[in-house]
Amino acid sequence: MKILYSWLNEEYFDSKLPSAEIVADALMFNSFEIESIEKVGNDTVIDADVLPNRAHDSLSHRGIAKELSVILGIPFSEKVIEPNYSSVDSNLKVEVRQKDVCDRYMGRVLKNIEVKESPDWMKNRLEALGQRPINALVDATNYVLLDIGQPTHVFDLDKLHSEKIIIRDASDGETVKTLDGNKVELQNDNLVVADSESVLAIAGVKGGKKAEVTKETKNIVLESAHFDPVSVRKTSRKIGIMTDSSKRFENNPTPELAIEAMEYLTRLIVKLCGTQDTIVEHSVEWHQEKEHKESISVETEYINKLLGTSISESEVADIFNRFGWDYKKTGDEFEVNVPPERLDLENGADLVEEIGRVYGYKNIPLQELPEIEASYVNKEFYYISSIKRVLVNAGFSEVYTQSFQAKGKLKMANPVAQDRPYLREKIDPSEIFEKNFRNKDLLGLEEVKIFEIGNIFSKDAVEKLVLSIRSEKELDNNLLKNFNISVSGKEAHIELKGIIEKLPEVSSFKGLELAGTDAVQYGPFSQYPFVVRDIAVWLPESVEPSELVDTIKDNAGNLLIREPRLVDEYKKDGRISYAYRLVFQSPDKTLTDEEVLENMKNVEAAISRKNWEVR
């Protein structure tokens, strides 16, 4: 959320704020991470990363101003929106068909306006925040959104088929041309705003071209609404359009904000575009009450126990007063009336969190933690971890495959993925095994050996814990003998629960401690094919093979991505033939034979200079 420093100063505080840097620090250490502070002309733009838990009330200048008022202890000057107009009866009708995803819709008709250019003060503020001024009608909606966090919209009344706004689901295949000229095909779970003929806007996401306002617009319909956050998010993702409006609705601003925004927008448009003939009609509203937690109680003793502080009752009261929250105190208990815009406050612990951050985490004294009693040892976890350790030490790699399947017998009532609605009845690592086998040179493996420990499900939905092992070569029957597990062949599937139950009880995690390892470096992998080449070289018995490896690495170029791997060794007549496998790969293209051959020639030339013989 980009915030203009002067906007905060001039609109929400009677006394001057401290410097932009101090404001940014206050937000950083008490509210939101600051992404950047940037000078724009004589002003400053602060970019705050407002996380989802506070996005419903803080994605606006007013939301940030309220935070600063609490943190800095500077009185917040509430903006009172006084109507600069009188209104008359309206013929506008609002019909909400999808009541589960729209709990408030307000419309208002304004007639005989004149679309003008926005004044400099508005254009300057919008431009400083990266918005392109268009005209006073459109700019007013953007201004209201940035100021108080409520999306609004304006339709050209004369382009509507009738004076009736309908909130409904789109039909499959129904299309709308958006304001940017793109044609969007809709599905039947996309909520739209329409007239009696066709779509006017994708609800909460983007307006349509049909009722676009232009310089010639004279009569308009204002929209201020509250759309379901899940519905807006799904529609936005499906059609691939994310806007400032959809971002706000996805984070669920209070429905009460729509009322204020309607009055705010009306006042702005009358001020900027009104004429002596302008008529403002009464707003028309459809609304259904939404449940809201009215109050939360918390005791001072609980606050101090949770924070590890000794905050007094008067300090708690002061913090609630700074928030501007109404509360009732009974003994040690505070009963706080939750403001409708603070949807994140659900219980006493949430109030404690607010108290703690305003009190200042730096002011909470350090305390030594009490000694922790020996933890309970989960037997199943202990033996699963022990089995994994044995297998990894034996050269096996652990893999994970999907519990959800495209086909099967046990279908889920609410599948996580529609293309995988079934639970697996067995662990089948064959696909992963084949991929590893095809790429074992790239992976630097002499032999592919994999295992997985996971749950499978029977027809009656009972979970079974299974160990599945697969190897290129015959499994060692003694591999897991310490766990009374016998394996044979190249593949084994063992149910573990019964076996683990019969193993000795354990009282500690001794033996499962992490062993020290060399530093591991991670990097991006290439999407392009790798190329394998083998080279065999005769060396005198007096020459160490490591010298040959170093020669290969020094001359094979940067396309050699693996340590040369010894694949054959042959001794004859006082000499030893070493055969090494080289793996080449490019990070940004498919290698040609000529490119690989050039690298191999360089290696062979270096070998010849040492008077060694390439076989």
Image (cartoon, rainbow, N blue to C red):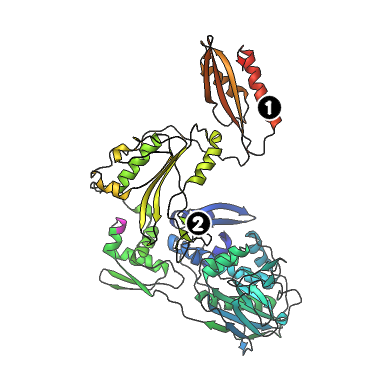
Query: Mark 2: which secondary structure?
Result: helix
Does dot 1 land on a helix, a strand or a loop? helix
Q: Which mark is residue 575?
A: none
Percent of width and height locating residue 583: 59, 31
Residue at left offset 29%, top offset 56%: 309
Left or right, 411 with respect to 187, comes to: left
Q: Is residue 267 visible?
A: no
Which region of the structure is painted magenta? 306-310
Q: Is residue 366 magenta?
A: no
Label 2 packing within 10 angstroms: few (<14), some (14-19), many (20+): some
The image shows residue 21, relative to residue 605, as above or below, that is below
Q: Nearer the viewer, residue 298 or 608?
A: 608
Spot the residue most to the right: 216
Which disc number belongs to residue 597?
A: 1
Task: Indicate whether 211 appears above or below 388.
Answer: below
Residue 594 vertical placement versus 64 (above, below): above
- 371 up-or-down from 142: above or below: above
Residue at position x 43%, y 72% from top?
Answer: 339
| Residue type beneath disc 2 | Val
x then y, percent, for residue 305: 27, 58
Q: How many marks?
A: 2
Mark 1 or mark 2, earlier in chain: 2
Q: Quadrant of the N terminus?
A: bottom right
Other-residue count near label 1 (Cα within 10 Å), few / some / many at <14 / 14–19 / ≥20: few
The residue at the point 56 percent across, 64 percent down is 247
Residue on which disc 2 sits: 23
Q: Nearer the viewer, residue 439 or 279?
A: 439
Between 514 and 537, the residue placed more toward the observer is: 537
